[in-house]
Image (tube, grey):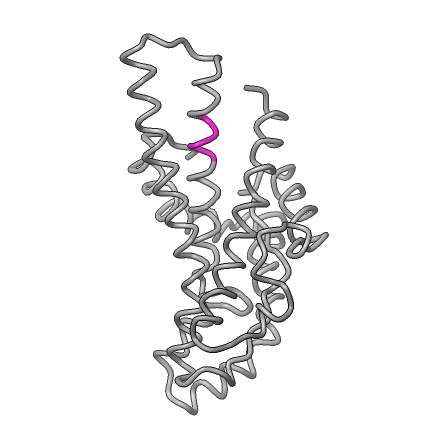
Amino acid sequence: MSDIVLRVLMFAIAIPSIVLHEVAHGYMAYRLGDPTAKSRGRLSLNPIKHVDPFGTVLLPLLLSAGGLPPFGYAKPVPINPGYFKDYRKGMLLTGLAGPATNLILAVTAGLASRAIGVVMEVGGIAAGGVVDWLWIACVLIAYFNLVLMFFNLIPIPPLDGSRVLPVFLSDEALHHYHRFERYGIMIVFGALLILPQVFHIDIVGAYFSVTVDPLLKLLTGASFG
């Protein structure tokens, strides 16, 4: 498979994976009593309602073209934690809903890739055919969703890990953490772009090498490392 085809396939996988991730946040919030996402039409699977021109389209393409793991984000689903009976628990569950959805997708795709691999081996199916393409697609689905899951679990705003962290903070520490949130996006982009491109320090890549890579190998038997 050519590099261009691989990148196009990855881009096609990215959009539904990101959309399902965001819908999961909104659905969990809805189940916890927050109607905000539902009232604004954000529980829809229609990608147009969730696409952010930069985060969903341009960012994955730029990262992929630069040889970095392709990931992105959709327009954040609006959540009003004032509806939650327990702020910390509500933020924890809504924060974990997106990564949990990506894990389910990754495991499902991994199991499918294993089954397809068995069919190819038993049936003596040669590489390059339709079945082989299905295997590649399943591996890529698993890979992208693992990247999306583990990246979002980093406890830096606005990533989902920042919704999990408050459970472990005192009220005073939480107050200071909320003041830090405004700088989160700059830290994220610094780790993604400035450190590897300017200083040749790939913190995110090192993190993925001990999270995404071994789990992908376990689920699919394949590796991009």
Query: Is 19 drawn above or below residue 130 in the view shown?
Result: below
Query: 28 or 178, which lies in front?
Result: 28
**Furthest-right residue in this view:** 53
Q: Is residue 141 left or right of residue 104?
A: right
Q: Position of residue 39 (x, y in %)?
A: 61, 71
Residue 182 in the image: x percent, y percent? 61, 76
Where residue 140 sits in the image (x, y, percent)?
A: 47, 34
Q: Is residue 180 above or below residue 55?
A: below
Above or below: residue 11 compared with residue 32: above
Q: Front-most of 208 and 134?
A: 134
Residue at 41% in and 79% down: 166
Residue at left offset 39%, top offset 45%: 212
Quadrant for the N terminus in the image: top right
**Range drawn in magenta:** 136-140
Q: Position of residue 169 (x, y in %)?
A: 38, 82
Camera-side residue: 172 or 120? 120
Q: Main secondary structure of the magenta part?
A: helix
Quarter of the image where one finds residue 92: bottom left
Task: Residue at 56% x, 35% y: name it.
Answer: 10
Instruction: Identify the image quadrant of residue 107.
Output: top left
Give left or right: position of 123 versus 202. left
Residue 139 belongs to magenta span = yes
Q: Is residue 203 one of those drawn in magenta?
A: no
Q: Which quadrant: the C terminus?
A: top left
